[in-house]
Amino acid sequence: MNAQFDFTGKNVFIFGGTSGINLGIAQSFAINGATVAVASRIQAKVDAAVAVLKELGSNAHGYSLDVRQVEDVKAAVTAFHDTVGPIDILVSGAAGNFPAPALGMSANAFRSVIDIDLMGTFHVCQSAYDVLRKPGASIINISAPQAYVPMIMQSHVCAAKAGVDMITRTLALEWGGAGVRVNSVVPGPIDNTEGMDRLAPTQEARAATIQSVPLGRMGEASEIAHAAMFLSSDAAAYISGVVLPVDGGWSLGGAPSAMAAKLAGG
Ligand code: COA
Ligand code: NAP
C-alpha cells in the first residue's frame, strides 16, 4: 500500500537511503513526485538505489560517503544544492547495530555506533542547515525504540538513539524560528530489514517479537515512509519536535498480542 501525497517540485535528501527502511522512504517520496538523493558508504548500494528511484520516475542522485566524515557530508549537500537546489526534506537514517553485551564490546565498538547514529545525525543536520529551503523545510531523524526502552545487548544503540531524539527536540527549538520543523520517526520491528535480521535472527526470536506487538505483526518499510511523508507534508505544518512511534503499539509495553486477541474475542 502506498499512501498518496504530492511532493512534486520538492527535493528530498536521505542519508542512509540505500537499503531497508530508508530506501523504502526514498521510494515513497519518489513515487509521490519528489527529486530524491540518497547517500551511504557502499558505492554499489548507492548505484542500485539510484537506479530503483529513477525507475520510479525520480530525478535521483546518489553520493557515496560515511556520515562519520563531516566534510564528506558537507560536500554532498553542497553538490546537491549546486546541481538541484535547496533541500525541502532531509532524512537522517544511517545507523549501525550489532547485539553485544556491554562487557562484550570494546570502547571502539561502542563508539562506532555513537559515531554513526548520533554524530552522523549531528553532522547531517548541521551540514544541511544552510542549504535547507527556509521557511518550510522538514527534517526527519530516524530513531529506534531503544531510545526510550532500555534493552539488553543494546547499550550503544540505546545511548545513541536517545541522543538522536534529543537532537530532534533541541533543533526544533533552535530552528523553529527559521521555519524548519524537526521530528523523529521511531520504527517498531520492521520486516525484511537488516536491523530485524540482526536483532531477531531465528524463527523463535521473530515469533517472540511479533508476540510483543499489540497489532500482532511486524511493520512494513512503507508504513514508516507514510509517517515520514505525513510529517513532511503541509498537513503537519504545525508539528515540530515530536518523537513519533510507528510500531503497532509495541511502545505501550502491554500484553502479548495472543492474550490481547483472546480478550478482544479473536
Ligand atoms: N560484537 C562486539 N563488537 C563488535 C561486533 C559485535 N557483534 N561487531 C563489530 N564489533 C566491533 C569491532 O570488533 C570493532 O571494534 P574493535 O576495533 O575494538 O575490534 C568495532 O565494533 C567497529 O567495527 P568495524 O567493523 O571496524 O566498524 P565499521 O565501521 O566497519 O562497521 C558496524 C560499523 C560495526 C556498526 C557494522 O555492523 C555496520 O557497518 N553496520 C551497518 C548496517 C547495520 O548495522 N544495519 C542495521 C541498522 S539498525
Ligand atoms: P539498513 O538497511 O542496514 O540501513 C542502514 C543504512 O545506513 C544503509 O543504507 C547503510 O548503507 C547506511 N549506513 C550505515 N552506516 C553508514 C555510515 N557510516 N555512513 C553512511 N551510511 C551508512 O537497516 P534498517 O534496518 O533498514 O535500518 C534503517 C534505520 O531504521 C536505522 O536508522 C535504524 O536504526 C532504524 N530502525 C530500524 C528498525 C528495524 O526494524 N529494522 C527498527 C527501529 C529503527 P551502507 O552499508 O552502504 O553504508
Image: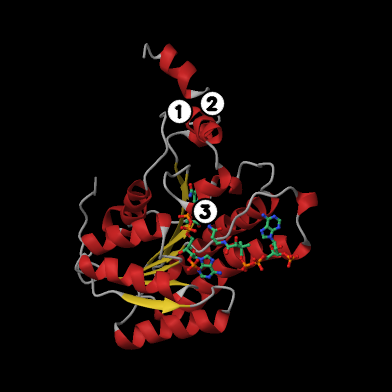
The local secondary structure at tag 1 comes to: loop
The C terminus - image quarter: top left
Residue picked out by circle 1: 214
Residue at left 52%, top 36%? 251
Task: Give the residue type at disc 1.
Answer: Pro
The quadrant holding residue 134 is bottom left
Q: Depth check: give the residue in front, 70 or 66.
A: 66
Q: Which mark is residue 143?
A: 3
Q: Label 3 crowding class (10 Å Cα cut-off): few <14, some 14-19, many 20+?
A: many
- Mark 1 Cα shell of 10 Å, populated few (<14), some (14-19), many (≥20): many
Q: Which residue is drawn at 55% across and 38% down?
A: 202
Residue 35 is situated, as x and y percent measured from the top left of the image, at 26, 72
158 and 198: which is toward the camera: 198
- Which kind of residue does numbered mark 3 sit on? Ser
User: Residue 148, located in which quarter of the rendered image?
Assistant: top right
Residue sitting at the far bottom: 82
Q: Do the residues labelled 2 and 1 touch (CB within 8 Å)?
A: yes
- Label 1 residue near ligand 2, CB within 8 Å: no
230 w.r.t. 211: above or below: below
Q: Residue 254 carries which label?
A: 2
Label 3 residue near ligand 2, CB within 8 Å: yes
Q: Is mark 3 on a helix, strand or loop?
A: loop
Q: State whether residue 136 appears in this view.
A: no
Q: Does the residue labelled 2 lie within 8 Å of ligand 2?
A: no
